Amino acid sequence: MKPPLISLAQRSKVIEYLFELARKQDFQKLHLQGQGNDDANHRQNDLSFILDVIIDFLDDDARRIINNDYKQKANRQWWESYYSKTTYYRLKAKATAEFLSYLKL
């Protein structure tokens, strides 16, 4: 994989934005389902579904980081029981670059 052209902070902002959009889309879908709208059942077109598929392609460390930092928004210090600070940031940089590479970003 080529080195990323954008910084870790920039990649983090993009991924945070994608998961925020997915949460909003999920909320709107629940609202539409409550109104009996059948279009709300097209899961393969959902951003949440696409992001989940990408997460499934990641290795265990990258999956853990993306899930905890962006999808679930876990406690900010969740990683301390898994990694040293240096290892966490090295793996986070790799995970964010790999995640976005699946979106061709």
Image (cartoon, rainbow, N blue to C red):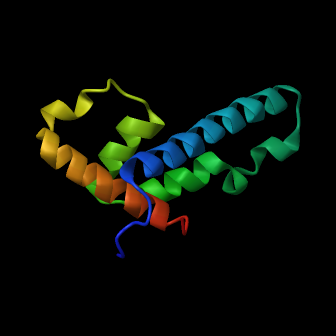
x, y percent for residue 84: 11, 40
Query: 17 or 74, which is in the foreground?
Result: 17
Q: Residue at point 62% right, 34% down?
A: 23
Q: What is the quadrant of the N terminus in the image?
A: bottom left
Residue 83 higher or lower than 92, as above or below: above
Q: Residue at point 25% right, 29% down?
A: 78
Q: What is the quadrant of the C terminus in the image?
A: bottom right
- Single out the residue that lies furthest toward the bottom: 2
Tell me if 40 is positioned left or right of 95 in this view.
Answer: right
Q: Quadrant of residue 25?
A: top right
Q: Residue at point 32% right, 44% down?
A: 65
Tell me if 92 is positioned left or right of 43 in this view.
Answer: left
x, y percent for residue 21: 65, 40
Query: 86 or 51, which is in the foreground?
Result: 86
User: Could you tell me how many numbered marks the image carries?
Assistant: 0
- Single out the residue that lies furthest toward the left: 84
x, y percent for residue 59: 30, 59
Q: Residue at point 20% right, 44% down?
A: 88
Q: Quadrant of residue 30?
A: top right
x, y percent for residue 50: 59, 55
